[in-house]
Amino acid sequence: MPNDGWRSGPAGKEDHIHDPPPARRPGRTAAQRFEVAVFDIPTPEAESDGTLTCTSTTVVVAEPSVGDVTGLGFTSDSAACADVIERTLRPVVVGSDRDDVPGTWRRMVAAGRRAGVRDGYRVR
């Protein structure tokens, strides 16, 4: 069974298995930059899902970079996502080992949960 960073604890409670942060290795193996941008793209005509009518689509883009290689992540959601990415995920990604994608992913999920984000939604 793959370890997704969670394990069952006593009485069925789940405890998070915390990965220690990796040694921050400077140079080409560590993520050096993490840019976040928000784009508001006008739609040719108003669009509706039956509850709300919109005249544009908001896209939030994240671009982590290692040397001259840049990754791309995006979501079509509120511009507020950019703040979550900037304040919660950027500190985890910058300096992380580019070859430890599973470990970086687990630390990003843990950081999101500590910030109150679960399954992509902010929980309060």
Image (cartoon, helix red, strand yellow):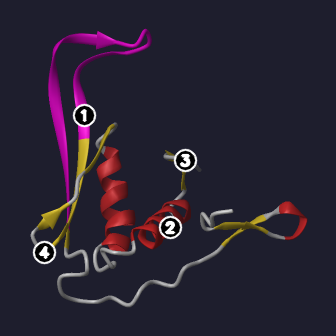
Residue identifier under label 1 = 58
* Of the two numbered discs 4 and 3 in the rendering, the one whose residue sits closer to the viewer: 4
Horizontal and vertical percent position of residue 124: 59, 50
Mark found first going from the N terminus, 3 or 2: 2
Residue segment shown in magenta: 34-59
Mark found first going from the N terminus, 1 or 2: 1
Mark found first going from the N terminus, 2 or 4: 4
What residue do we see at 28% from left, 42% from top? Answer: 79
Horizontal and vertical percent position of residue 65: 18, 67
Q: Quadrant of residue 45?
A: top left
Magenta-span inclusion, residue 57: yes
Label 2 – label 4 distance at C-alpha: 23 Å
Residue 119's disc is 3
Pointer 4: residues within 10 angstroms few (<14), some, or many (20+)? few
Pointer 1: residues within 10 angstroms few (<14), some, or many (20+)? some
SS for dot 2: helix
* Of the two numbered discs 3 and 2 in the rendering, the one whose residue sits closer to the viewer: 2
